[in-house]
Amino acid sequence: QVQLVESGGGSVQPGGSLRLSCAASGFTLREHSIGWFRQALGKAREGVACMSSGGSFTYYQDSVKGRFAISRDNAKNTVSLQMNGLKPEDTAVYYCATGGVNWNGCASRRYDQWGQGTQVTISS
């Protein structure tokens, strides 16, 4: 069964850190572009960070540059998102997703396999 399962969400104070993980089963992550997306209440889903299948290309949304880092562990078939310096505006449901082998950026329409999402809440 092809599946992506996120973990690591939670509630932290502004300035804190969280590390999200996404485990893939039923397929090999290294053959796919990977991405982290988020959707805040009442807002459209947006790309946060994406990486090409070979790792040569990465994309970060301007608002997270220097604070978030996407990585993949092909041996463990997982992808992670390290989030530092969290702000209240980072509050959202975060999803991992996979796209094709070719790099097509970080538009959600380019990603066809999605996890169920994990809630991240930043509040004092």
Image (cartoon, grey):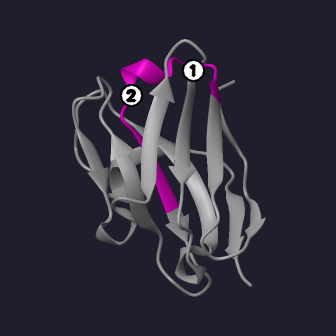
Distance from the alpha carbon under mark 1 to that under mark 2: 11 Å
Against 64, is 90 above or below? below
Question: Which residue in the structure is indicated by mark 1?
Answer: 77
Amino acid type of the residue that numbered disc 2 sits on in the rendered structure? His
Location of residue 65 (image quadrant): bottom left
Q: Residues within 10 Å of mark 1 (few under 14, many from 20)?
A: some
Q: Residues within 10 Å of mark 2 (few under 14, many from 20)?
A: many
Q: Magenta segment range?
A: 24-37
Disc 2 element: loop
Question: Which residue in the structure is indicated by mark 2?
Answer: 32
Disc 1 element: loop
Q: Residue at x 54, y 81 (%)?
A: 89
Q: Is residue 46 left or right of residue 60?
A: right
Q: Residue at x 47, y 29 (%)?
A: 72
Residue 85: % across, % down:
53, 66
Q: Is residue 33 magenta?
A: yes
Amino acid type of the residue that numbered disc 1 sits on in the rendered structure? Asn
Instruction: Pick out the residue farthest to the top.
Output: 75
Sequence order check, earlier mark of 1 and 2: 2
